[in-house]
Image (cartoon, rainbow, N blue to C red):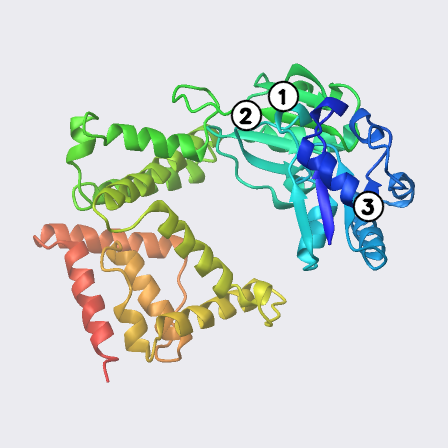
Amino acid sequence: MIMFIGLGSSPDDMTAKARKAIDAAGVVAVKTKKTAALAAVKKASVTMDDLFETSESFDDLNSAVADRLQSLESSYETVAYCSDGSGLTDGAFKELKSRGANVETIVGVSMGSGEFADAVLKMTATRALELRPYIDGGASVEITEIGDSLLAGELKLYLLEFYDADKKAVFFHGGQRKEITLGELDRAGKYDIYSGVFLEGDASLGKARASFGDLLRIMERLTAPDGCPWDKAQTHESIRTNMIEEAYEAVDAIDCKDIDAMTEELGDVLLQTVFHCDMAKRGGEFTVGDVISELCGKLYFRHTHIFGNDKATGSEEALKYWENAKAAEKQYTSLYDILQRLPKGFPSLLRAQKALKKAVKAGAESVGEKITEQELADGLFNLVSRALASGLDAETALNKKINEFIEEFKE
C-alpha cells in the first residue's frame, strides 16, 4: 500500500496521525527535501529530487514519481510518501489513482499548506490550461503548481476571460503569501511546483466582469417571489416573439460588422434562452443544465468526422455527415418526414427556400433557371406589390403553397 501524507507547509503543520503513519511505514519517501515541511521528515530514505531534474514536464514528473513509488511497494508492505500541502493535489497521487493502485491518504493541514478551504475549483496550472474549465466568478478558485513565469503568463491570460485585471488575488509559495492583482500574476515572485494563486469568489451582481453564473443569479433574483412583477408574469408563449426579434437584431449587427452591437445583441439572444430556462425550472419542466447537455450531445454525436470514424476533406462533406447523423438521430424515414419537421414559424421565404433545397438534394425536385440577384429582387418586390393591390397577404399565400408542396411527397 502507498500512503500519501500531506504535511502542510511547515514542521508545525504535521498532524499526529501523519507522524504515526510515518513511524509505522516500511519505507518513507519525500517529494523533495528542499522545503521546510519535508526536510523535517527525519526518517525519509528516498527523495524524488533527482526526478525534478530529469523530467521534461509535470506529467513526466508525476509518472516517474508514481513508477518509483510502485517499485518501492514491491519491496515494502507500506510506503509512506510525504508531500507539501494536503497531499490530495499531488500529481503522483492522481496518476496512481488512475492506474488503480492501492493508495490511501492522510490529508494535511489545509490552511497551513497554502490551500484555501473555501475554494470550489482546485487544480494545477497545467491541468487548468489543458481543460480550460468555465469559471463562475461567484466561486473561489485555487490553482497550484505554477512552475515558471511563462506558465503564470498563460494562466493569467486564461483567467482574464473571467476576471478584471485588478481582481485581488493571493499568491502563495512555500508557506508565504502575499496579495496581488490578477494582472501581476506573471511577475509575483518565485515560481516552482509549490507556487499557486487563490482568487476569492464574488457573487455580487453589479461587478463589471460577470460570468454565466452571475447571469443565472440575476435571472433568479428577477423572478423570485419579491422580484420584478413583469418578469415573474411571463410565460414561454408571452415572450416567444422576443426570441425572433432579438435574433434579427443580432443578425443585423453581424451584417453591419458592428462589434459593439454584436456584443449587446448576442447577449439579448442569450437572455431569451436563460429566461426560458428559468421559467422552465420554476415550472419543473427543464433546467439550463438540460439545455446545455442536449446541445453538447448534439454537437458531439453529429460531428462524426471529428468524434467518430468518418473523414471529411471539406465543408460540404462535413455537412453531409452532419445531415446523416441528424437523420439517424431524428429517425427520418422519408423526404416528407424531413419537410414536415421544418419549423412552421420560419418566415415563408426562408421556409420555401429550405423546403426546395432539401427536395432538390433528395433528387425529388429540379433546380429552376438561373437569374441575377437584381432580377430576383425585382420579381419578389413586384409580386408583393401585386399582392398588396389585390388585398392578399404574401406571407400567408406562400405558406399555403409550401404546405401544398410538402403534401405532394406524402406516401
Q: Kindly report the distance in space between the C-alpha atoms of the residues bearing marks 3 and 1.
A: 28 Å
- Asked whether the viewer can see residue 248, the reply is no
Disc 1 on helix, strand or loop? helix
Q: Kindly report the distance in space between the C-alpha atoms of the residues bearing marks 1 and 2.
A: 8 Å
For marks 3 and 1 on the same chain, the one whose residue lies earlier in the sequence: 3
Question: For this view, does 24 lie left or right of residue 268?
Answer: right
Q: The C terminus is located in which quarter?
A: bottom left
Above or below, 16 relative to 401: above
Above or below, 259 relative to 133: above
Marks 1 and 3: in contact by CB < 8 Å? no
Marks 2 and 1: in contact by CB < 8 Å? yes
Name the kind of residue labelled 3 in the image.
Leu
Residue pictured at 64% horizontal, 32% vertical: 143
- Residue 61: mark in rendering: 3
Above or below, 408 relative to 228: below
> Whole-percent x and y of residue 371?
39, 62
Residue behind mark 1: 182
Q: The N terminus is located in which quarter?
A: bottom right
Nearer to the camera, 264 or 206 = 206
> Whole-percent x and y of residue 256?
44, 35
Nearer to the camera, 173 or 44 = 44
Name the kind of residue labelled 2 in the image.
Tyr
Please tell me in which quadrant of the rendered image residue 13 appears.
Answer: top right
- Residue 76: mark in rendering: none
- Residue 163: mark in rendering: 2
Q: Kindly report the distance in space between the C-alpha atoms of the residues bearing marks 3 and 2.
A: 31 Å
> Whole-percent x and y of residue 216?
36, 34
